[in-house]
Amino acid sequence: MSKTFRNILAVFIAILPINLIMIWYRLTQTENFSTSDMIVYPLVFGGGSCILILLLNKYLVRNSFKETFNSGKGTWYQDVLIGLGITVIYFILFFIERATLYQWIPNHNPPNTELLDTIRDMATNPLLLVIWFIPVLWIGVALFEELSRVFLLKCLWNINENSYWHITVIFLTSILIGATHIYQGTAGALSIGLKSVIVCFYFYKYRRLLPLVISHALYDGIQFAFLILHFQN
């Protein structure tokens, strides 16, 4: 089995199915997720996908964890600092996009009541808060999405060493990731896609996974924490 075929097969097994299912389900969804769904599904599908990706990376792609996810130079504390820096960039973009992109492309979809219901439930239940802010946020959301992003990048980069191909892959990956968030509206999908381009280029240059996971978890977590405090007050 050739290297190219192994990498393409890995993408078809670990990345495309779950992303296409997410896009299809969100576009055809008629019922909101319950709070338990919002906690269990990320842990089961996100956590399970992380395990699948790691197994495919080792046994199908035949790369070590370091080769695929952490081949760049650096230390854990540098990764933490860079993760904090990317988080700041995310929030700068957040406020710029609210003043521009979200004004130019208003979202006519109904409010995301499932998210609001989950936040209300967490605001009054400390156990739900702990479960969501530790395993769900860090494993089921941040680790899953960043591991998937990097695995897709690396598998496609492994097909061809040409730098133009690598840059093309960055944009293709970001389009796919933006599309999986289309339920947030066109502006939301574009916003997610733009942030993906930024972190993909970061990984292209520095090849370190941890800053991506940290920034993703902090960006989502801070927004959730703000909303929870709002409902508690």
Image (cartoon, rainbow, N blue to C red):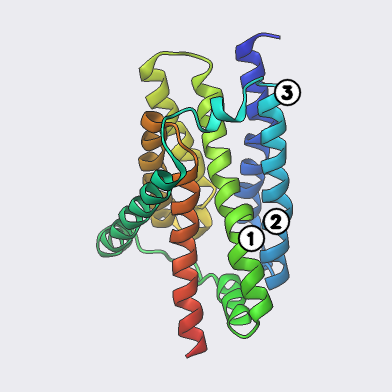
Residue 59, numbered circle: 3
Asked if labels 2 and 1 touch by Cβ distance under 8 angstroms, the answer is yes
Foreground pick, 53 / 28 = 53
Q: Position of 48 compared to 160: left or right?
A: right
Asked if labels 3 and 1 touch by Cβ distance under 8 angstroms, the answer is no
Marks counted in the figure total 3
Disc 2, SS: helix
Q: Which quadrant of the figure has residue 132?
A: bottom right
The residue at which mark 1 appears reads as: 136
Amino acid identity at mark 2: Leu
Tell me the crowding category of disc 3: few under 14, some 14 to 19, or many 20 or more residues within 10 angstroms, Cα based: few
Q: Earlier in the sequence, mark 1 or mark 3?
A: 3
Image position of 149 with respect to 66: above or below: below
Tell me the crowding category of disc 1: few under 14, some 14 to 19, or many 20 or more residues within 10 angstroms, Cα based: many
The residue at which mark 2 appears reads as: 43
Q: Which quadrant of the figure has residue 10?
A: top right
Name the spot of residue 227 as percent of width and height, x first: 47, 77
The residue at 57%/70% (across/down) is 115
Q: Position of 102 compared to 211: left or right?
A: left
The residue at 58%/39% (across/down) is 148
Image position of 7 with respect to 118: above or below: above
Name the spot of residue 133 as percent of width and height, x first: 58, 66
Amino acid identity at mark 3: Tyr
Amino acid identity at mark 1: Val
Mark 1–mark 3 Cα distance, whole angstroms, equals 27 Å
Mark 2–mark 3 Cα distance, whole angstroms, equals 23 Å
Image position of 220 with respect to 164: above or below: below
The residue at 33%/52% (across/down) is 85
Name the spot of residue 209 as percent of width and height, x first: 49, 39
Q: Which one is closest to the eye, mark 2 or mark 3? A: 3
Q: Position of 93 compared to 215: left or right?
A: left
Foreground pick, 215 / 79 = 79
